[in-house]
Image (cartoon, grey):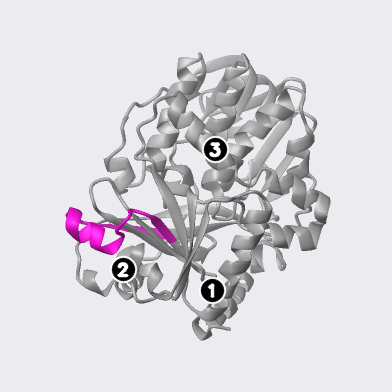
Amino acid sequence: MSTAPSSQHVASWYAATANSRLERPALQGESRCDVCVVGAGFTGISAALHLAEKGLKVIVLEASRVGYGASGRNGGQIVNSYSRDMDTIETKYGEQTARALGDMAFEGNRIIRERIAQYDIQCDLRDSNLFAACNAKQLEGLKDHKALWERYGNRDLELLVGDEVKREVNSARYIGALVDHSGGHLHPLNLVLGQAAAFESLGGVIYEQTPLTKLEHGSPVTLKTTGGMVKAERVVMAGNAYLNGVLSELESRSMPCGTQIITTEPLGESRAKALLPNNIAVEDCNYLLDYYRLTNDNRLIYGGGVNYGGEDPSDIETVIRPKLEKTFPQLKGVKVDYAWSGTFLMTLNRLPQFGVLNDNVYYAQGYSGHGVTCTHLAGRLISEVMTGRDDRFDAFAGLPHLPFPGGRLLRVPLSAIGAWYYETRDKLGI
């Protein structure tokens, strides 16, 4: 799949049920601001809103529509921590770094809930998510996971074993599960649209259909677009997988990846409740994991798999339907009303990339499929580092990020080989 954006949202259930279809104008002529944010997804809008709340003049440039990328088409699950958890961070980067990141591991979740309450954002927020174990090794891993998160302050965890899982998920696939009652799920496109409206209510400006064509470092920074330019004292690069060569110095250290989602026809309340009795969001513990949840109109959203390099499969339903029917045989033959792909940005160590170029161009990207909560944390940390507090931003910025082996030519096949290896281990339960 090309990461070049189109002029409209992908044809997803989210787009079909968006609270707003407001189309904002493209930038024309020259503008000036304190901070220019490139990208109107979770990272960009979170940063813009935090900065506007602090009284800065902020302009957001979006190549397509607000929430066009992963922010508006993901699984909608509020999952705590990072794509690599605290035990890995402890082992690789030391106790001090682990403690600094661990102190923030559950903050993105809290920020989301604060935003929803503060600005009355209607995005179908529901509590709790669940990690499901498909084999004994994964169940042991969940026991360790529970102890780890409790050590870092999460006391809202519950381990389910054997038939206890059926309380939450009516599937024979799982032998155990870990429920995080502090997690949850929501309509991600409506969340980002609600925050964009809040930003605009504070005087912020968003230009859509305004791709960045050139960034010229300096003081101020000059950002050139197809219809005009912005001069800004500072810049936030928040395009993630959609920067299209604008930050070429970072490209070797990340890789666009695609994931696919389908949404069923409405199942009706009783049929939906028979699948997920307490309306919990679920992801399994496989390396190439499946994830799913119910919508507010009793559909099942089901996603899974990764395409390295971001290429779309020719038939998304053909890829995802077997996964859905393996999990819920009772849905065999169910009608699928929506099917779409999304592109996220993966890093080699699966930890997000934060940093600053030339002292005034900040970036946050590479959440590696774990971005709903961490993007909101990123927005807060960017606002902090721009207004005098740098310790929390620097905890992330100090993480080393190496290029993918083999460079741009070989990163996709080598990653696919690695994924095949871990997928085989999952199937064998080793």
Q: Is residue 368 magenta?
A: no
Name which residue lies at 36% across and 27% down. 23
Among numbered discs 2 and 3, the one appearing first in the sequence = 3
Determine whether the residue tagged by mark 2 lies in a helix, strand or loop: loop
Determine whether the residue tagged by mark 3 lies in a helix, strand or loop: helix
Name which residue lies at 27% across and 40% down. 17
Specify whether 301 is left or right of 236.
left
- The residue that disc 2 covers is 170
Q: Nearer the viewer, residue 123 or 96?
A: 96
Name which residue lies at 63% across and 38% down. 378
Among numbered discs 2 and 1, the one appearing first in the sequence = 1
Q: Answer yes or no: do the residues labelled 2 and 1 have beta carbons within 8 Å?
A: no
- The residue that disc 1 covers is 139
Q: Nearer the viewer, residue 82 or 333?
A: 82
Looking at numbered disc 2 in the image, what kind of residue is underneath it?
Answer: Asn
As drawn, the label of residue 110 is 3
Q: How dense is the environment of label 1, judged by Cα within 10 Å: few (below 14), some, or many (20 and up)?
A: many
Specify whether 355 is left or right of 420.
right
Query: Compared with residue 41, is residue 326 higher up or lower down, i.e. above or below?
Result: below
Looking at numbered disc 3 in the image, what kind of residue is underneath it?
Answer: Arg
Q: Is residue 268 magenta?
A: yes
Q: How far apart, in angstroms, are the residues tagged by discs 2 and 1? A: 18 Å
Find the magenta span and give its range.
260-282
